[in-house]
Amino acid sequence: MERGKNKNKEGILLESGTNEIEVMKFRVLGEYYGINVAKVQEIIMSDKVKPMPHAHPAVEGIFKPRDTLITVINLAYYLSGSSVENQPRDLFIVTNFNKMTIAFRVQSIEGISRISWKDIQKPDKTIANGEEGVATGIAQCENRLVTILDFEKIVAEIAPETTIQISEIEDLGDRPLCECPIVIAEDSILLRKMIDDSLERAGFTDIKNFNDGQEAWDYLSSIKNDPDLYDKVNLVITDIEMPEMDGHRLTKLIKSDDKLKKLPVVIFSSLIDEQMRKKGKELGANEQLAKPEIGHLVMILDELLKKFQADKPNM
């Protein structure tokens, strides 16, 4: 296999850092939605589900294919807020992210499209129902508008205990303040606030947030020739899935730039698995962590910032 390229589950050769995504399109309530193929473990016919008492209304229950218990979320109920009769030909999209396996009930699968993150637009606040809706972005796939759903946010709303926990920071005990400037690229307002709150609790006092990789890259490009560059940024944390520019592309640009390549880059994403880890390493990422391991992230930041300060290159 060529360096810098990986095969996805369908065997399609994808080059690392090209700022592209493969979107699996599906229908719920007659509307078209999308999910990143990297999150999809398999597609299976819907099966009998055992209801669970006191579960969130969108959680149908559990089923057990091949001796594995999997939670089933009814996307139609989640998206509409009302019960919809299940159909015999419904499908389960079995996903794997944040180290969890969850099935989502959908009506049908409509194929896969490969598109650039630049062609995915973030909905404005009027469409997104206030500060943040459930859409990662809106994509033009062939002749259709497809809403790419934020599955991390869906799961975080249904089961808050599965996402970033401040308690992990509290378990670290008293920590000294750290004034090292950190750049964060994260498109989810919800997760960005959680990360911010956690890092502030951990003593980090200089955090600059950006809504996607493009905004972060524009900022880094604007300061890279500054003699005080390393007074403005010491480390970059990036998600992978983001409109405009994804985290892999951002990592590749940083590590290919003579002025910026010494900056430590940490990929903090729900998508970290063996294949993604290999891809991130090829692009030059210093560390890669799976959400929601915020306590582990803090320890990694301590190590990388200490090393960066000791070996800080001269401008």
Image: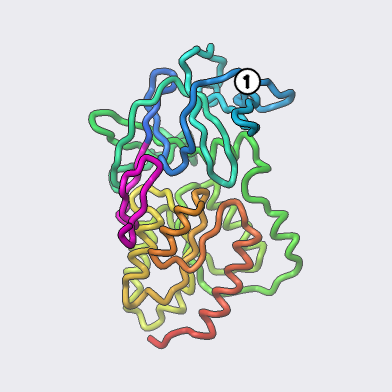
Q: What residue is shown with label 1?
A: 49
Secondary structure type for disc 1: loop
Q: Position of residue 273 (x, y in %)?
A: 51, 52
In the image, is 180 to the left or to the right of 109?
right
Task: Say if the magenta span includes residue 21.
Answer: yes
**Can you give x and y, in whole percent of width and height, for residue 22 in the image?**
35, 41
Residue found at the far left of this picture: 143
Which residue type carries mark 1?
Val
Question: In the image, is 142 to the left or to the right of 173?
Answer: left
Quadrant showing the C terminus: bottom left
Q: What residue is shown at x 75% (from left), y 69% (from top)?
A: 174
Image height of 204 relative to 268, above or below: below
Q: Which residue is depicted at the point 52% across and 29% down?
A: 104
Q: In the displayed image of the protein, which residue is found farthest to the bottom?
A: 314
Q: Position of residue 90 (x, y in %)?
A: 48, 18
Residue 232: quarter of image: bottom left
Q: Residue at x 47, y 34 (%)?
A: 42
Q: Residue at x 32, y 37 (%)?
A: 139
Q: Nearer the viewer, residue 308 or 181?
A: 308
Name the residue nearer the viewer: 128 or 183: 183
Q: Which range is magenta?
A: 1-23
Q: Is residue 299 above or below residue 31?
A: below
For residue 22, side relative to residue 187 (left or right): left
